[in-house]
Image (tube, rainbow, N blue to C red):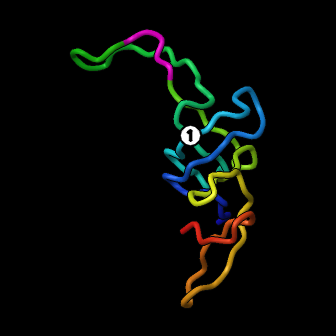
Amino acid sequence: MSKLHVKKDDTVVVISGKDKGKQGKVMVALPKENRVIVHDAAMVVRHTKPRQQGEPGGRINKEGTIHASNVMLVCPHCKKATRVAHAFSADKKVRVCKKCGKNID
């Protein structure tokens, strides 16, 4: 199973594509497809029928998936977009910011 450099609830910035420069939180990480869903990025339109009483139908805007290589993690300490290094602390593998050197996990 492939691993991603981002996890659910991480803050990321989109580095390529139509939403380049947007920042948002990872809502869903899909490691098998190597894709992520970022809040308010890669919006797509779905045409849906109302299935239950009171459910809206018509054109619904929702977030689409973005390839994981097109997003970059934002360090919670230095607030900069950064690559992720891995280090061991107390027999546990943790993610480390390449810019400031602090633990992300």
Is 60 or 51 nearer to us in this picture?
60
Q: Residue at x 54, y 69 (%)?
A: 105
Q: Quadrant of residue 53?
A: top left
**Number of numbered markers:** 1
Q: Quadrant of the N terminus?
A: bottom right
| Most common SS among magenta residues | strand
Is 105 or 79 nearer to us in this picture?
79
Q: Residue at x 65, y 50 (%)?
A: 33
Q: Amino acid at mark 1?
A: Gly
The picture places residue 15, in percent across and down from the top left corner, at 75, 40
Is 70 or 97 nearer to us in this picture?
97
Up-down relation of residue 85 to residue 42 (above or below): below
Q: Quadrant of residue 41?
A: top right
Residue at the extreme top: 58
The picture places residue 75, in percent across and down from the top left corner, at 62, 57
The picture places residue 28, in percent across and down from the top left corner, at 51, 47
Is 85 or 2 nearer to us in this picture?
85
The picture places residue 50, in percent across and down from the top left corner, at 33, 15
**Does 59 appear in magenta?**
yes
Up-down relation of residue 96 to residue 45 (above or below): below
Q: Please give the range of residues in magenta.
A: 57-61
Residue at the extreme left: 53
Q: 85 left or right of 39?
A: right
**Does 40 appear in magenta?**
no
The secondary structure type at the circle numbered 1 is strand
Label 1 crowding class (10 Å Cα cut-off): few <14, some 14-19, many 20+? Answer: some
Q: Residue at x 60, y 75 (%)?
A: 94
Q: Residue at x 70, y 50 (%)?
A: 72
Residue at the extreme right: 16
Instruction: Find disc 1 in the rendering and name its residue.
Output: 24
Up-down relation of residue 72 to residue 22 (above or below): below
Up-down relation of residue 69 to residue 47 (above or below): below
